[in-house]
Amino acid sequence: MKKTFQKTLVAAVVASASLMAHAGGGTPATDNLLFPFITTKASAQTFLSIVARDPLALPAAVGTVIPVHITYTTRPTASGACSHFDGDMAMTSNDQMTFEISNRTLVNAATADTTSTPVQLPANATDRLGFAIVNNNAAGAYGTGAIYGSYPLYGEARIVDTATGLYLSYSTNDLHTTAGGNPDFAVATGAGPDATFGAPGTLHVNKLLNWFSTGAVDTTWFVLPLSDEATMGFANTAAITYQVRNSFGTNGGHYNNNEVFRSSTANFAATCIGTVNRATLLDPIVATHSVNGGWGTFVRTAGTANNALVYSNEVLQPGMLGGLGQFVTRVPVL
């Protein structure tokens, strides 16, 4: 049964990844990628697919090996400190590499991929969540002695969690940033995530949160402070503080689904990676104000990070729509 399940996963992931579809806006590819949400839960598998496109008029000879560096930064799913695991992956010119980050499904063997060698997390990195940064900028210095080729990279992720009914996919379109040996994902030049296109540009640091009735959906939020790769991926010190406020972003509090505002002073600080539920985010007492649904603006109030990516994690409650269901959605910016 396990082999049948793995074959089904491989077929679905490879078929969808091979299309390399990039929905929505964003900027053209650069030589780095940000995968903002990955997981190694026992019930889940995270597949990454990367294409390294040779941009030259006369591409490198078939089989030319290029190094591509990956940095995983994760923490225990429940809570805890972040740690990183990194290394050089081997690809070839115009190659596609698809792999499961914990090596639970042997994609290379199943698809006869002989031109790429991924770096995957070790066996003891279980029940963790986090992000991954991929870079092959020629100025990159990761202590490996490799010479990187600055190839444009294209990425997609597929996450399947059989325990919660999560089938999540996303592309890295508009999640990469300006090329650099130490790429900065919080730049406001229009090239970074949640930045206005065009110089000088602005950061859409504030977001809009809304949630469904708690009887139908249990909602938490995943907050990834943005900075340069060294700060995010290696030092693990990128930090940001948010508060839920009114529609003008001036007073702490939130609205229920009937426009009624209730003030509060709760703040939420995320370092490296943060997750928070409604009670903590809104204040346990006033959270009861919006059990039937509500919303508020998510305003940055402090922190070393100038921006963050924010995702809502929604789990269907028992009996809703006849089965398990979990959704991860990038929240809108203001």
Image (tube, rainbow, N blue to C red):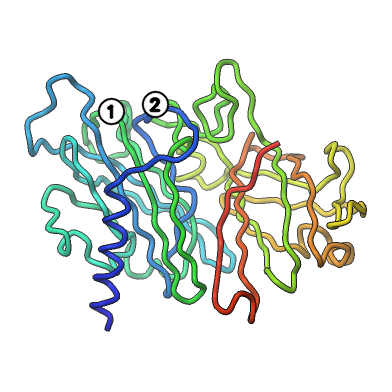
Q: Residue furthest bottom?
A: 1
The image position of residue 174, as x and y in percent, is 48, 35
Q: In the picture provided, is 291 more to the left or to the right than 311?
A: right
Q: Residue furthest front?
A: 321
Residue at figure coordinates x 28%, y 70% from the top left: 8
Write down the residue under mark 2.
Answer: 179
Q: In the picture provided, is 321 more to the left or to the right than 210?
A: left
Write down the residue under mark 1.
Answer: 150
* Residue type for callout 1: Ser
Of residues 248 and 324, the one nearer the viewer is 324
Residue at figure coordinates x 23%, y 49% from the top left: 97
Residue at figure coordinates x 27%, y 41% from the top left: 51
Q: In the picture provided, is 69 more to the left or to the right than 275?
A: left
Of residues 289 and 134, the one nearer the viewer is 289
- Vertical side of 207 occupied by 258: above or below: below
Pointers 2 and 1 in contact (C-beta within 8 Å): yes
* Residue type for callout 2: Ala
